[in-house]
Image: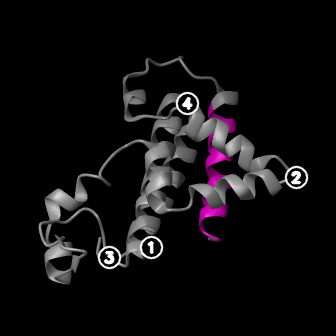
Amino acid sequence: MDSPTAIFAIAEWRLAEADALRRANLYEGAIYLAGYGVELILKAKICQRLNIPNLFDDGFVRSAGRQVMGIDFRVGAEFRKFYLVHDIAKLLLLTGLQDRFLADREADTSGQLTKARTDIVEAKWSEELRYLAAGTKTKDESLAFLEAVNQFRAWILTV
């Protein structure tokens, strides 16, 4: 991955895979993978906003040779650890778009962004969902989650 665009493309692929799992009645996997899609979307947005190619390669900061306010960001691992998390709420905060999301959510008369917030962030998606047993989630739950993810994806691509 050498750009936010490439990260977005992988996120799109993960979301397509999640939808395929949902259609195959593999609801736990669909929710789990869709959450990773959201995570990648947020990480791509962070890269866009920080004007860096990616968060996944130690060399990205060294190659940029950046030093800001006395902090040497050429030590990539130290810089990256704040961003390499699986917490959707933290990643939204790290994009710098949380206040915008909350404002847009308040203005959204359709309720779609409120649903996205509730289903994705407040429902506490986490990588721990990988341990769910088959039959833990329902078709309706997976469909609702994927719809919320698509609403959130549409929003983040506009900001």
Q: Which mark is residue 52?
A: 3
Q: Which residues are magenta?
A: 142-158
The type of residue carrying mark 2 is Thr
Q: Earlier in the sequence, mark 1 or mark 4?
A: 4
Query: In the image, is residue 27 part of the stretch drawn in magenta?
Result: no
Secondary structure at numbered mark 4? helix
Q: From the viewer's perspective, is residue 68 above or below residue 58?
A: below
Q: Secondary structure at mark 1?
A: helix
Q: What whole-number distance in Å separates the C-alpha atoms at marks 1 and 4?
A: 33 Å
* Mark 3 neighbour class, 10 Å CA radius: few under 14, some 14 to 19, many 20 or more: some
Instruction: Please give the label number shown on residue 27.
Output: 4
Which quadrant is the N terminus positioned in?
Answer: bottom left
Q: Are marks 1 and 4 in contact (CB under 8 Å)?
A: no
Can you identify the residue that label 2 sits on? 109
- Mark closest to the chain's N terminus, 4 or 2: 4
What residue is shown at x 43% (from left), y 28% (from top)? 129
Please state which amino acid type lies under the numbered disc 4. Answer: Tyr
